[in-house]
Image (spheres, coloured by chain):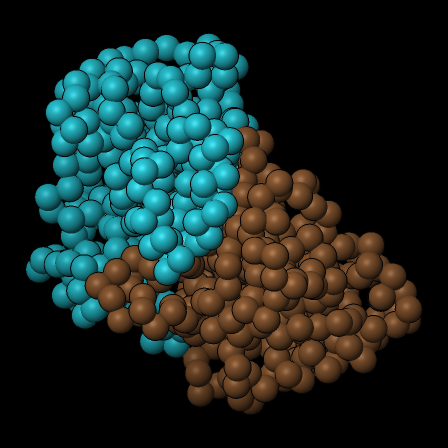
Amino acid sequence: MIAIIARAGDRVARAVAAELTATGAAFAWIDPRMIQRLTAHPGSRALTGLRCDGTRFRLADVTSAYSRAGAPSERAQMSVYGALATWLDTTPARVITRPRQAGSNASKPYQLQLIGRQFRVPETLVTNEPSLVETFARTYRRVIYKSMSSTRSVVREWDRNETARLERIRECPVQFQRYVPGVDYRVHVVGNDVFVARIMTSATDYRYAGRWHTDRKISTATLPKPVLNRCLALARQLDLAICGIDLRLEADSEFTCFEVNPSPAFLLFDPDGKQGIAAAVARLLS
Amino acid sequence: MNGLSSARVRKRADSLRTKAMHVPKTWNAFSHGTPTSDLDGWVILAPQADRVAARLALLLEKMGISPVRRVTELELAHARWAHWISGLGNCSTWVRLEDGTVLGPGLRGVVNRLTTLTLPQAVASSADADYARHENFALLISWLAGLRCTVIDRPTASSLGGTGLSHSDWVGRALSAGFCVPPVRERRRLPTSRHLLINGTLESASPVSSRFRAACRRIAVASDAPILWITAIDGTPPIFIDARTPIRMPPDVTARTVVTLLAR
């Protein structure tokens, strides 16, 4: 049995489910918020089954799972999510993606250290010392700042005139990076398949181009074979069967990598499924 | 311990001293002209009231691993941080504590025993407290991951110290690693022994079967814990009772781990 573990409204998981349906593959949808009961082995207490939305599932029957469970939104759900995470980490079934494999995304600067083995990364300073930021900005002229945890934040360019605001970093270290000019590419690795999309925009953070009233055009693209191979190598290095890799092509023809998303929401780059990302995930599960 | 003299341990500890990739030109600005002293030794990151940390510091110093400086989560919360990552992904970090001590290129090793992060009062009571906690956690992960010296118990995505796994979590991992897990009521009667696993190598006094060795390695990989103190029985099949990461190990076992790592 194939299990899709995601909230009912998860559009990415729905796209994968549609591909599974199209190929006639049977699957069960498990919404972690709808789990009513967990069954554990009486001696070992290891998870063996669950009841979700009135249906009972034997976890030994699961041969592959696509997990987009995310984090619980309520404290009461924490134990269910925790038990599910343990099962996902330890089951012999094929799991896309095991929680422990997604760990590097919890710290962006840590992930940059890993990415640096395959790609150039933006020069980065994490500090709570304003004078260091000023020196960093003098060195690189244009500097952006963004969150360093998995908490989503909008990437913004730092305005040197905001010196008074800079004092606030004394309360909490902030991540600053060299602004990397160039063209954005998003590479999705699914098993051995690689899908490339090019994003043309003048926004600092293309995800929020609409918020800044700037244009954003996403199109299918190709990249040189050595770059694709480095993307595959990076996915393997991070032990990820699927991932979304954010690259920017600079004027010197070198690619800079910003981060690797272990649970990519690929519909933005493949809204009508023409690239075939959802179909590739479905193939991997089948 | 492990047949190593104090002098040899000290020599090895010296040779593992972290090398600074570059001293940023901004360093002078960072120190603000105040007197600082670059710590040339070991650090134990631990809460103020951690008695095991105090005992461990004494044991390490007795073994010739010195100086050992205990750093509390409160000191880290009020420290000035400078964490650089180069375009190649290399990182260098300077942490200036309030007393002027700098944790930087002179660090020879770190034992992490932190389980919680403290935020400065102004941040802890603000609406951004959760965000700040995640950000500080991410910084701590990156700092300890980027150190080239020995680090015992690096934080993982799910836990600051150790793996954060409950006994049920360990059991799940033990079963998939090839162990058999007896019911709780039967465990006390079993003739168990303890095994220290360090980076995939079992440091057992007596020989163990290859099956047992492989099961121990698998549980370490599945739990993302390179150092484990496993209570088990080398039988057919191997029987799992308990596993502890360094944060739950007695100080003498942690000290033994440090010495073993330095000897390798």
Colour in which chain A is drawn = cyan
The colour with which the image depicts chain B is brown
Answer with the quarter of the image where residue B234 lies: bottom right
Reply above or below: A173 against A255.
below
| Quadrant of the image occupied by residue A145 | top left
Q: Closest to the observer: B15 or A179?
A: A179
Left or right of B209 in this view: A68: left
The relative height of residue A251 versus residue B262 in the rendered view (above or below) is above
Classify B179 as above or below B87: below
Q: Position of residue B27 (x, y in %)?
A: 61, 48
In this view, the residue farthest toward the front is: B33
Pick the residue in front: B175 or A12. Answer: A12
Lateral position of residue A108 relative to residue A33, left or right: right
The answer to whether one can see residue A76 in this image is yes
Residue at screen point 49% across, 45% down: A132
Counting from the top left corner in percent of width and height, residue A82 is at: 31, 63
Q: Residue at x 35, y 48 (%)?
A: A166
Nearer-the-camera pick, B140 or B230: B140
Looking at this view, is A223 or B116 the one in front?
B116
